[in-house]
Image (cartoon, rainbow, N blue to C red):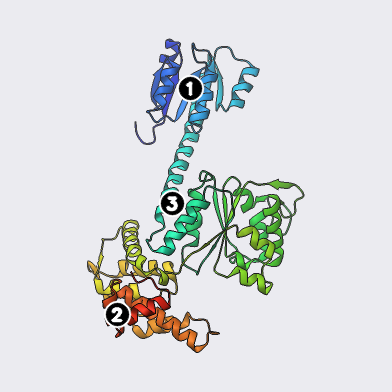
């Protein structure tokens, strides 16, 4: 059987009909398995990939309805065609309500049967592609794709593991580039909703008028340019997960409308009057401190508590430096595979610089640097000379560290934060060997250990 050749399972206790059907479908280019025993056919399904099932209605021990009920329960993606010599409108309506793809009366016209089989096999092909795509997405965005062994990432994974099976709304906080959408997708694919849609919306990318239509949809003629009815993201996400990124950028009007949907699980399209009910889980993300935004009056307190049932704080990359070698290896392998590029290694000195850098753009910036090196470096190894200037230049690194400090910090706090950043970088460059880190900093090991305690830095 070729990849594009649909596999048809025939079930009929009348062996003459079975033979005629088998020859007809073989001549049409299908792969065919013909069985006269429905119980054997169901056992065959447990071990074989089948695209379409054609079954007779009246058979001993198991009827066509029994077979259909079994298929719909255990193999709901397989289209089932029912055949019978005792056709009636009532019988047709009955099996169609049970989920049969089509109902064919014996004796049948060959063209009629082949057209129905063709339509069923096309539907099966769509289902197969969807399953493969979904499995690919689940593989790509599953929990194992959150790379790291640091305490901060272990805490995040533990929260995902606890929250995913529930219906609770989740708020993910963290700087830009820390992987908030990746965590949101991991929550979805680890949840009972994983077979449903994952719909993502960036609230900052759209102005409030466009965002309202994007979220809730609109009716035809509701505004200039609304030439047809359009379903919104809430409607499209029903049965699955809606991810709202940059939630802190919502206008006050949109905050009120979002709160109503979260409370009532229903809404109206723009320009519409009919209420639409949805079954969704909402996961949101922000790089702002929403608690501070509430205190400033920029974000509704009631909406904040609706969204913040489970809170996950993603650590910036500079606070999980022990994960950088793992992330490097992951990105180098991924970029080589996707770009059909030769594999490369990275020399220890270059790894030291990458581990000690402050990474203001976090994981997104790290992936960008790795891709640049994988594309531009012609040799087999990435060296210090191949790194971008901002990574290998000590003055540029210091400027990056200063730029990341809030302007309102007083001098003592600023110096403490700079000292803590230098200690973290030295530890990373020394592979977390404290004696080596102390030598890099020009201080004693006992002083380093004092400062590790002072700044609550994990010295391993």
Q: Residue at x 50, y 15 (%)?
A: 62
Label 2 secondary element: helix
Q: Residue at x 32, y 56 (%)?
A: 337
Q: Which mark is residue 385?
A: none
Q: CA distance from mark 1 to mark 2?
A: 77 Å
For residue 420, side relative to residue 63 (left or right): left
Which residue is at the front of the view, 449 or 212? 449
Q: Residue 238 at what x, y percent from top left?
A: 61, 47
The part of the image, by quadrant, that contains residue 250 is bottom right
Q: CA distance from mark 3 to mark 1?
A: 37 Å
The N terminus: image quadrant: top left
Q: Residue 158 at what x, y percent from top left?
A: 46, 55
Q: Is residue 35 above or below residue 347?
A: above
Q: Nearer the viewer, mark 3 or mark 1?
A: 3
Which residue is at the front of the view, 278 or 167? 167
Residue on which the image places disc 1 = 54
Q: Residue at x 34, y 80 (%)?
A: 448
The C terminus: image quadrant: bottom left
For residue 268, side relative to residue 318 (left or right): right
Label 1 secondary element: strand
Q: Is residue 169 above or below residue 328?
A: above
For residue 201, side relative to residue 36 (left or right): right
Q: Earlier in the sequence, mark 3 or mark 1?
A: 1
Q: Earlier in the sequence, mark 1 or mark 2?
A: 1
Q: Is residue 194 above or below residue 350?
A: above
Residue on which the image places disc 2 = 445
How busy is the neighbourhood of tag 3: few (under 14 within 10 Å), some, or many (20 plus)?
Answer: some
Q: Which mark is residue 142?
A: 3
């Amino acid at each position: 059987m070729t990849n594009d050749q649909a596999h048809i399972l025939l079930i009929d206790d009348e062996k003459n009909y079975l033979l005629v059907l088998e020859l007809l479908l073989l001549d049409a280019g299908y792969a065919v398995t013909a069985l006269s025993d429905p119980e054997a056919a169901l056992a065959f399904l447990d071990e074989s990939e089948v695209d379409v099932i054609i079954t007779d209605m009246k058979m001993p021990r198991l009827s066509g309805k029994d077979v259909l009920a079994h298929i719909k329960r255990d193999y709901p993606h397989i289209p089932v065609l029912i055949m019978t010599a005792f056709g009636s409108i009532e019988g047709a309506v009955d099996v169609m309500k049970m989920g049969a793809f089509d109902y064919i009366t014996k004796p049948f016209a060959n063209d009629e049967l082949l057209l129905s089989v063709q339509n069923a096999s096309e539907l099966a092909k769509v289902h197969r592609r969807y399953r493969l795509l979904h499995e690919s997405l689940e593989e790509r965005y599953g929990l194992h794709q959150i790379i790291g062994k640091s305490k901060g990432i272990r805490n995040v994974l533990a929260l995902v593991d606890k929250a995913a099976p529930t219906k609770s709304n989740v708020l993910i906080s963290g700087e830009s580039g820390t992987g908030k959408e990746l965590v949101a997708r991991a929550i979805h694919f680890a949840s009972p909703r994983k077979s449903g849609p994952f719909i993502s919306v960036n609230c900052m990318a759209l102005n409030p008028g466009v965002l309202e239509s994007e979220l809730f949809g609109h009716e035809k003629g509701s505004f200039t340019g609304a030439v047809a009815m359009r379903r919104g993201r809430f409607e499209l996400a029903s049965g699955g997960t809606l991810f709202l990124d940059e939630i802190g950028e919502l206008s006050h009007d949109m905050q009120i409308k979002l709160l109503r949907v979260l409370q009532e699980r229903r809404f109206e399209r723009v320009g519409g009057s009919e209420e639409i009910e949805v079954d969704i889980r909402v996961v949101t993300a922000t790089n702002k401190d929403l608690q501070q935004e509430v205190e400033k009056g920029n974000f509704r307190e009631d909406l904040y508590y609706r969204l913040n049932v489970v809170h996950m704080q993603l650590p910036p990359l500079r606070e999980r430096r022990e994960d950088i070698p793992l992330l490097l290896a992951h990105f180098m392998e991924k970029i080589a595979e996707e770009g059909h590029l030769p594999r490369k290694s990275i020399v220890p000195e270059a790894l030291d610089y990458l581990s000690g850098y402050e990474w203001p753009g976090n994981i997104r910036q790290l992936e960008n640097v790795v891709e640049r090196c994988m594309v531009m470096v012609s040799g087999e190894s990435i060296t210090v000379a191949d790194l971008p200037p901002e990574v290998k230049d000590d003055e540029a690194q210091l400027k990056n560290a200063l730029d990341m400090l809030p302007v309102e910090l007083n001098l003592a706090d600023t110096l403490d934060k700079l000292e803590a950043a230098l200690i973290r970088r030295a530890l990373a460059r020394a592979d977390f060997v404290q004696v080596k880190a102390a030598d890099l900093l020009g201080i004693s090991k006992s002083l380093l250990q004092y400062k590790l305690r002072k700044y609550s830095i994990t010295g391993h």
